[in-house]
Amino acid sequence: MASQAHSKPAGVQGNDQARRRVRHRRIMFWSLVAILLGSIALPFSGYVYTAITSARAATEQNSNPIANYWRAVREGDKGVTTADGPYATNVLIQNGGQNWRSVRNGPIASIGPWVLAAVLLAIGLFYLARGSMKVHASRSGARVERWSMFERVLHWYTAILFIIMAITGLSLLFGRAALIPVFGLQGFAAYAEFAKDVHNYLGVPFMAGVLVEVAIWIRYNTPKSYDWDWLKRLGGMFSKDPSSHPSAGRANAGEKLWFWYIATFGLIGVCISGLVMDFPNFGQGREAMQLANVIHAILALIWIAISFGHIYLGSIGVEEAFTGMTKGTVSKEWMLQHHDKWYEQMQEQGTAGQAAGAQRPPASPGPAST
């Protein structure tokens, strides 16, 4: 069976060819349009890339190029230096210096004044409420030695140096905020240079005085069984009942705490850290100097705060206490009220006799004449 050829009419074939040509023309047209648009847009891709990378860099760095440079320097990358000496390194900027400055000028310089002010306010309010601690018994005229001449000279030598060191140290620590508005920049600069030299040069003589005090008074400041009772009753400071005053030796428990703060945190913490800063020629590094400065400032502030209480009790807070440190003697009644255990020990040793030159009524010989 012969196959019959399948064919389309000539008109239909012509229409198909026309549609293919139109489709090819559309494809070519849109291809040209895409190429043209791509050719136009391609040069702008560099600007887009630059904008994206710049924005990313700005986001990561979040600062200007100069700040980025010094930030990189603070990372501690080593370079080359021609300087020599114990503090010369290949690091342009030691980041620890900024950390030290943040601590010194931050919490220490901002909290310290408030602590000192709070202590002074508390002392003032206590004095207004309590007043001076008076001697309750009637005076017999008998007097006993409280401090020897050597002890008094040593005390005032160290106390005067302490006051000078405290004033100069506080003015250097808080001077920028407290003194520049008063003296001005030039005035404060001149004073700060003077205060720094005074503070540095008097540090060693002050430390020597503290060492001698610790050496001669340590035997009177060992803990005793009755010290705990003194602390529990706060030395009778909040009671005006004569019978409520607790017993004490030559140094009461409060004085012992004051002594041991000086012997430990004062002598080892403040004085030794001061020597570290006073004598950098020993070769200690910057980190050691910065740590010493922070320790020195914190412990010195605590020392000064406690000294306010010591000065108050030794002047207007306790009757006759100041006389004992100036003239060396106190009344027998004062000694029995505040340091009865010490007076008993003096009687046993035969050293509780009347001080030279003191007047005592003949009708009241009292135990101090023995």
Image (cartoon, grey):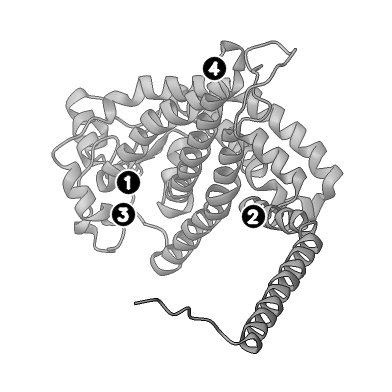
- Residue pushed farthest left? 225
Q: Pick the residue in front: 279 or 101.
A: 101
Q: Position of residue 162 (x, y in %)?
A: 55, 34
Tag 2 residue: 56
Tag 1 and tag 2, C-beta contact below 8 Å: no
Label 2: which secondary element: helix
Residue at screen point 48% across, 81% down:
6
Q: Position of residue 363 (x, y in %)?
A: 27, 44
Relative horizontal placement of residue 180, taking residue 349 as reference (left or right): right
Which of label 1 and label 2 is nearer to you?
Answer: 2
Tag 4 and tag 2, C-beta contact below 8 Å: no
Asked if residue 24 shows in the view, the reply is yes
Q: Residues within 10 Å of mark 4 (few under 14, many from 20)?
A: some
Which of label 4 and label 3 is nearer to you?
Answer: 4
Relative horizontal placement of residue 129, taking residue 190 as reference (left or right): left
Residue at screen point 27% across, 24% down:
219
Which of label 1 and label 3 is nearer to you?
Answer: 1
Amino acid residing under circle 2: Arg
Tag 4 and tag 3, C-beta contact below 8 Å: no
Amino acid residing under circle 4: Gln
Q: Position of residue 71 (x, y in %)?
A: 66, 40
Tag 3 residue: 138
Tag 4 residue: 284
Which of label 3 and label 2 is nearer to you?
Answer: 2
Tag 1 residue: 334
Amino acid residing under circle 3: Ser
